[in-house]
């Protein structure tokens, strides 16, 4: 895995050995960032279920102002921290080692609003998708017109809870799909 574009372009990422993660492919990340291109510069970005941090580091490489990473598995968390250190990323990144909902609750309590949220739990973990999307739909964590993007299996439609999130685009590539959701006023 490597960073595709921006100031860290072509740099390789550290990944845990033998770990059973399913990283977002370079091709799918390229598609993601092509769609989000006009929104990245200066954005507050969350990389949920971050694994090695490839998506969030790509966002920083392309000009995001701040990235919040959530990862609670030991081996990917170590790789994420190693990648942040390797690229000299400091205050512009915050890591939550207690997982996604802990990060979202902390940000909401602090009144921080996000421009872009990317979530990529294990495809089979429907409760993780449901809980994360429900939190985003029910809380004012997303700025008006912010975007949430869920990576999921292309074989299963994403179930979006009622609230502030409206799906507007899905892109499938092989086994993976990206569903883009817009935050709207209630």
Image (spheres, grey):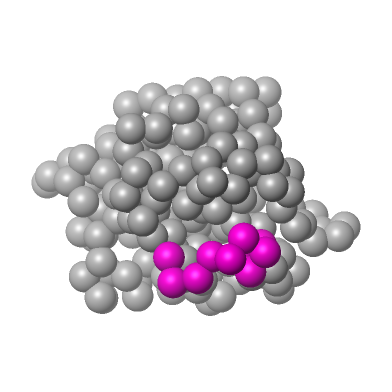
Q: For this rendering, which residue is in front, 117 or 127?
A: 117
Asked if residue 156 is positioned above or below residue 55 in the image, the reply reads: above
- Name the foreground residue: 67 vs 126: 67
Task: Decide whether residue 150 is among the magenta residues.
Answer: no
| Residue 183, horizontal then vertical, whole percent | 24, 43
- x and y percent of residue 22 in the render? 71, 46
The residue at the far left in this view is: 186
Residue ID at (42%, 28%): 35
Number of dots carrying numbers: 0
Q: Quadrant of residue 38?
A: top left
Is any atom of residue 117 visible in this view? no
Horizontally, residue 137 falls left or right of residue 148, namely left
Which residue is found at the position 76% from the left and 57% from the top?
Answer: 15
Given residues 177 and 12, the one toward you in this image is 12
Q: Residue at x 73, y 48 (%)?
A: 12
Q: Is residue 107 visible?
A: yes
Q: Residue at x 26, y 76 (%)?
A: 109
Q: Which residues are magenta?
A: 83-92
Residue 96 locus on image (x, y percent): 50, 73
Image-based side of 159 in relation to 163, left or right: right
Dominant SS in magenta: loop
Please say if 88 is above or below 133. below
Above/below status of 114 relative to 123 = below
Please tell me whether residue 90 belongs to the stretch shown in magenta: yes
The residue most toward the front is 7
């Amino acid at each position: 895995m490597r960073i595709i574009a921006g100031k860290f372009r072509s740099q390789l990422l550290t990944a845990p050995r033998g770990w059973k993660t399913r990283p977002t492919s370079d091709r799918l990340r390229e598609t993601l960032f092509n769609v989000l291109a006009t929104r990245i510069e200066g954005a507050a970005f969350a990389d949920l279920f971050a694994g090695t941090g490839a998506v969030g580091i790509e966002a920083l490489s392309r000009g995001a102002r701040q990235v919040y990473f959530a990862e609670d598995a030991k081996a990917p968390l170590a790789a994420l921290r190693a990648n942040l250190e390797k690229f000299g990323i400091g205050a512009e990144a915050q890591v939550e080692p207690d997982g996604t909902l802990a990060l979202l609750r902390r940000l909401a309590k602090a009144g921080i609003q996000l421009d872009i949220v990317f979530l990529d739990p294990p495809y089979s973990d429907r409760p993780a998708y449901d809980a994360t999307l429900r939190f985003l739909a029910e809380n004012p964590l997303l700025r008006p017109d912010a975007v949430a993007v869920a990576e999921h299996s292309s074989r299963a439609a994403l179930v979006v809870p009622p609230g502030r999130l409206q799906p507007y685009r899905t892109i499938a590539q092989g086994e993976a799909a990206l569903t883009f959701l817009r935050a709207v006023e209630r």
